[in-house]
Amino acid sequence: MSAMIDTPVDTPARSNEIVTLQAHILQQQSRYPEASGQFSWILSALAISAKMIASHVRRARLDDVLGTVGNQNVQGEQQQKLDVIANDILLRTLGGREGVAIVASEENEEPVILRTDDSAERKYCVLFDPLDGSSNLDVCGAVGTIFSILRKDRRSPDPQASLLQCGAEQVAAGYVLYGSSTVFVLTIGLGVDMFVLDPAYGAFIRVARGMQIPKTNKCYSVNEGNRLSFPEGYQKYLSWAQERGYSSRYAGAMVADVHRILLQGGVFMYPPTRKAPKGKLRLMYEANPMAMIVEQAGGKALSAPGERILDVRPTDIHQRVPVIIGSSEEVDQVAAHL
Ligand code: AHG
Ligand code: MN
Ligand code: MN
């Protein structure tokens, strides 16, 4: 890990300074005098996208954009109207940034090549899940956006192939949680920082730096309805945890479930099931970015015992992977049962 967490958790109340996401990005950029600024512009496109999507999510019921559009996405899942709106917002904001060469989304079968020339200026790929947990929208539940940023591999003539890098190569990753507040969690490989949208000013304000996930907490997060179709080791783990008084928490949106675990500790899992033998979650824009965040916060993220998610070599941008992610001791306990 390239992580170097230079400042422990630091709240505005203690330090007395107010730092917006924009100011934070510029502060980080100033640490790299050779930086062209392209990367910072990409992060700012993600921040404005988050504000725009948040405003649509808040108005979803009023604007009648709940429900499906009648199409299935590439994964055979119903596209919700807001999935399409959020995808469009991200494509349009990132499309305006010179530093973005390729974007890949859960909602687009093929990556979208924004710029084909190989100039040194156009050097990043952005992968995203525009709206995670979108079926929660119909019940005003929490939803999110997940993103991963890779450097474009200029050795590869095929733009799609340049996307197929391990998660360990990510230069940045993050998510936005549209919950009771809109929260932006970001890592650029220097620890994890958290920002909350102040609706009065329309700015993300930094509320925590160098976040550290608790090493242990007796809490698991998994769709237990699938229990009987999990591999035996997961079933044994669940019995083990229940005998020890663990709590179960499951929102049905990875962003919301992993966010709780980042703050309070525990383990989130999406195991293989009969219906989804490789698990349900997508490696490139769900598992990898969440794994980078959790590892940067001192936790663990495995696809199987001894197999880091970040080391999985991708063969397809939409491939799925089993996920065990969270507090180091809790992830170890799951792995020990498998
Ligand atoms: P998406 O809405 O982007 O397709 O993702 C939903 C995912 C993930 O957020 C969540 O953890 C999982 O699906 C829930 O799946 P189950 O309903 O099978 O538990
Ligand atoms: Mn998702
Ligand atoms: Mn989605």
Image (cartoon, rainbow, N blue to C red):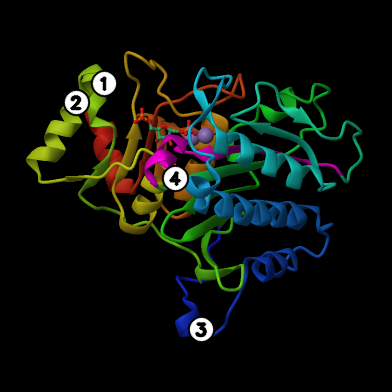
Q: From where the camera sits, is residue 2 visible?
A: no
Ranked by sequence position, the earlier of labels 2 and 1 is 1
Alpha carbon of mark 4 to alpha carbon of mark 3: how far? 28 Å
Q: Residue at x 23, y 30 (%)?
A: 224
Ranked by sequence position, the earlier of labels 2 and 3 is 3
Q: Measured along the vertical axis of the image, is residue 140 above or below residue 37? A: above
Query: Mark 4 is on which residue type?
Result: Val
Residue highlighted by disc 3: 15
Query: Mark 2 is on which residue type?
Result: Gln
* Residue 70 horizontal/vertical position (percent): 55, 22
Residue highlighted by disc 4: 255
- Badge 1 marks a residue whose secondary structure is loop
Ranked by sequence position, the earlier of labels 4 and 3 is 3
Q: Measured along the vertical axis of the image, is residue 319 above or below residue 185? A: above
In the image, taking residue 330 as reference, residue 67 lies left or right, namely right
Alpha carbon of mark 4 to alpha carbon of mark 2: how far? 24 Å
Task: Determine whether the beta carbon of the residue marked 3 sits less than 8 angstroms from the nearest atom of ligand 1.
Answer: no
Residue highlighted by disc 1: 230
Q: Residue at x 42, y 25 (%)?
A: 280
* Residue 266 horizontal/vertical position (percent): 28, 48
What segment carries the magenta color? 122-141
Q: Residue at x 15, y 45 (%)?
A: 246
Task: Determine whether the beta carbon of the residue marked 4 sits less than 8 angstroms from the nearest atom of ligand 1.
Answer: yes
- Badge 2 marks a residue whose secondary structure is helix
